[in-house]
Amino acid sequence: MELGTTYTVQPEPPDPRCTVWIDAGSVRFGVESRHVDPEALRESYRDDPEGWAEIEAASPEGGFSDDGVSLHVVDAASGHEYLRFDAFDEEPHYHYVADSGDRNQVIAFDATANGDPLDWSLARLEARLAPMLVRAGAEGLVARLDDERVADGLARVRAVAHEAAGRSQRP
């Protein structure tokens, strides 16, 4: 059974001004404090009219707006983002992103079943990183993971993510 919705457009790139990167061997984790709005999305995709058209078609009336913390899982060698967890206030979700550039599977988060989206996302990274990377097509990356470096990195991710969550809350 296919979960969520699969798009060809790739996720919006992390904003380097709002992202803390944590190296963990063959994988890098990014913690980003995010504010998403239609204007920012339009600007991000200004050089990708097909991608923007796909986003616009999938957006609610008035466009997509949300705040929260995004957790990025990136292959340190290639820079490709295979997993993203968007622990947003209104519409939390997560992504499996194939490195082919044509598959971005977005799965809505069920807060009733899973609780707090940030805590759930962190727990998934700690307990299910390898199988989730395999699902995203990153078998080669999984083979290079150093469990100790990943665990150390994720401990730092947890601390930075909770700090970012405090900053991302709307007044």
Image (tube, grey):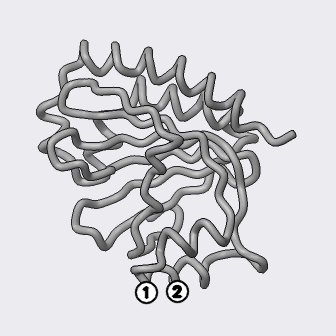
Q: Position of residue 170 (x, y in %)?
A: 81, 42
Residue found at the very far right of the displayed protein:
171
Residue under numbered circle 1: 50
Residue 143 vs residue 76, the one in the foreground: 76
Q: In screen coordinates, is 156 left or right of 26?
A: right
Q: In screen coordinates, is 51 left or right of 98?
A: right
Q: In screen coordinates, is 171 left or right of 99?
A: right
In what element is the residue under mark 1? helix
Contact? badges 2 and 1 (CB < 8 Å): yes
Badge 2: residue crowd in 10 Å (few <14, some 14–19, many ≥20) = some
Eyeballing the image, is 149 above or below 2?
above
Cα separation, mark 2 vs mark 1, equals 5 Å
Q: Position of residue 165 (x, y in %)?
A: 67, 31
Residue found at the very far front of the displayed protein:
17
In what element is the residue under mark 2? helix
Q: Quadrant of the N terminus?
A: bottom left
> At 48% from the left edge and 50% from the top edge, which residue is drawn?
15
> At 21% from the left edge and 39% from the top edge, which residue is drawn?
76
Residue under numbered circle 2: 53
The kind of residue on which mark 2 rests is Ala
> At 70% from the left edge and 32% from the top edge, which residue is drawn?
167
Eyeballing the image, is 131 above or below 13?
above
